[in-house]
Image: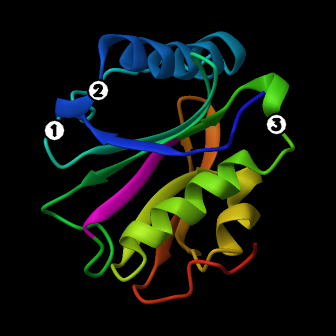
Amino acid sequence: MSDNSIIAKPWSELTTDELYAFLRLRTDVFYVEQKVDESELDDRDQEPTTVHFWLADGSRVIAYLRVIEDDTPEHEDARHLIGRVVVAADHRGRGLAQQLIARVLEQYGQLPMLLHAQSYVAPLYARFGFEPFGDDYDEAGILHTSMYRPGAVSATTGL
């Protein structure tokens, strides 16, 4: 059973076991379960400004996301992007993604942020102040919605 302690680390502090555990979860969900056919390893994980957030049950990562920084914001002044949000199939419905988002907003909530949600879960992010912009689009065969959140919105919205 997870103690629900969220771990947050930049690339330089990750152990090989931690890296393996969250890459395994991302691969199991995005490639095996969702049949995504685009590259998972995009070199953004290794950037010094990328921060990885996860929950573990023992050595198994059960929920994960990362925050990357971009020099060329695609919406207003948002330079931070939440991505690769994933929860293990046998741990869904327990609010783990919400816990991770809340933790990210504790750290980055004063800053404008972006994310590209699988459209069916966009309402989850809306509860945290993210608003859709642009048209929905297909990414790797899955409908996605781009979402923007201005800075300084309460990080506890929706909890």
Name the amino acid type tagged 2. Answer: Leu
Look at mark 1 in the image and give the residue it sits on. 47
Could you tell whether 67 is left or right of 88 in the image? left
User: Residue drawn at (29%, 67%), measured in percent from left and top?
Assistant: 74
Marks 3 and 1 sit apart, C-alpha to C-alpha, by 29 Å
Name the amino acid type tagged 3. Answer: Arg
Which mark is first along the chain, 1 or 3? Answer: 1
Labelled disc at residue 14? 2
Residue count near mark 3 (Cα–Cα under 10 Å), binned few <14, some 14–19, many ≥20: few
Q: Quadrant of the N terminus?
A: top right
What range is drawn magenta here? Answer: 79-84
Q: Quadrant of residue 125?
A: bottom right
Which mark is first along the chain, 1 or 2? Answer: 2
Across and down, in percent, residue 30 comes to 59, 22
80 falls in the magenta region: yes
Element type at mark 2: loop
Name the amino acid type tagged 1. Answer: Glu
Labelled disc at residue 92? 3
